[in-house]
Amino acid sequence: MSRVDGLRLMALAEAATLLLLVFVAVPLKHLADMPLATRIMGPVHGAAFVAFLWFVTRAWSEGRVDGAGALRLFVGATIPFGGIVNERWLRRRAEDGGLR
């Protein structure tokens, strides 16, 4: 697996954990009185988010994405479904030769 593939995979993992947190765990906590859902999913998403930020920082430091691209990836990771958009953007850039 290349570093670009790793970054794309982490974008999808971060997106999936955010979506599970926002659309499954939080409603379970508030509507079904199941706070355990967020106690489990919160740290899982936190770890995925930190790992994704590490991948973005590494890609930026290696010159595979510029500062604007790194900022775009970070902002996208904070918005539900933004991680999916990030992954598609990374895939297009890799196919066009914009990522190494």
Image (cartoon, rainbow, N blue to C red):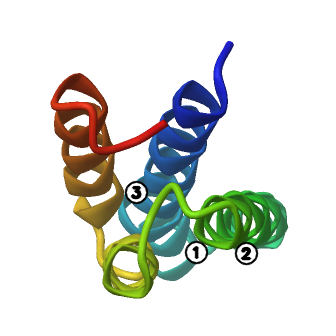
Front disc: 1 or 3: 3
In the picture, the disc for residue 29 is 1
Q: Label 3: few (<14), some or many (≥20) within 10 Å?
A: some
Above or below, 33 relative to 11? below
Q: Position of residue 56 (x, y in %)?
A: 61, 65
Residue 48, by quadrant, is: bottom right
Disc 1 versus disc 3: distance between alpha carbons? Answer: 15 Å
Pick the residue in front: 46 or 4. Answer: 4
Q: Label 1: few (<14), some or many (≥20) within 10 Å?
A: some
In the picture, the disc for residue 35 is 2
Front disc: 3 or 2: 3
Disc 1, SS: helix
Disc 2, SS: loop
Q: In the rendered structure, which disc, 1 or 3, sits on the residue that comes first in sequence?
A: 3
In the picture, the disc for residue 56 is none
Residue at 70% from the left image edge and 72% from the top image edge: 61
Whether label 1 touches label 2, CB < 8 Å: yes
Q: Amino acid at mark 1?
A: Lys
Q: Amino acid at mark 2?
A: Pro
In the picture, the disc for residue 19 is 3
Residue 87, by quadrant, is: top left
Q: Position of residue 81 (x, y in %)?
A: 24, 59
Residue at 70% from the left image edge and 57% from the top image edge: 55
